[in-house]
Image: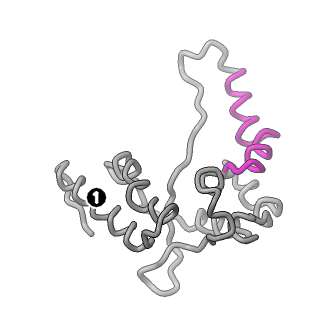
Amino acid sequence: MPANLTSGVASASGDWRVAPLPQWEKGDKTSAENGGSSLAVPKAAKNKELAYAFTEFATTGAGASTRVAQGAFPAARADLESKAFLDAKFPYFGGQQANRIFAESARNVGENWSYLPFQVYANSVFNDTVGKAYVSSTKLDDGLKAWQDASVKYGNSQGFTVNK
């Protein structure tokens, strides 16, 4: 996410900070995941060995360090826990060592956490709701409420029972 913010909302550099997710229970540290990607070798690949070698290079080999240094989130626990990753300071976040919070969050993903069955829709309305807090005078609470309301309305219209 830091790379997305620095490139998408560059004018806000230095104005934002990273914080752990709010919790329902005092002392709880449960978190969730949002995002991610994968590299796969399709069954019909012509050169599976070469494709697999590239996947290793990009995720756990020398290429992983380059990707992480350019803002990608680590694919391997060793990179996630490395001093270089944890100690990186983000001018965008006022010099904060934001990776420390990201790594802690990654360690505390709830055991039963999963994406919404309509996550693609929820992601598609993020910029029109929460995203306004980054680029206008919309308060973050108002943006989050609008996102929740739009997601609940859509989920219910698709036949899901959505708890607020």
Residue found at x 65% / y 55%: 6
Side of 79 where 140 appears, left or right: left
Please state the extent of the stretch shown in magenta in the rendering.
50-72
Q: 12 or 115, which is in the foreground?
A: 12
Circle 1 residue: 150
Q: Position of residue 16 (x, y in %)?
A: 62, 70
Q: Position of residue 111 (x, y in %)?
A: 46, 63
Quadrant occupied by the N terminus: bottom right
Q: Is residue 96 above or below residue 34?
A: below
Q: Is residue 53 above or below residue 155?
A: above
Residue found at x 63% / y 72%: 17
Residue found at x 64% / y 56%: 10
Side of 146 where 47 appears, left or right: right
Is residue 162 magenta-colored? no
The three-letter amino acid code for the residue at tag 1 is: Ala
Q: What element does badge 1 sit on?
A: helix
Q: Main secondary structure of the magenta part?
A: helix
Is residue 62 magenta-colored? yes
Q: Quadrant of residue 95?
A: bottom right
Q: Is residue 109 above or below residue 73?
A: below
Side of 121 where 57 appears, left or right: right
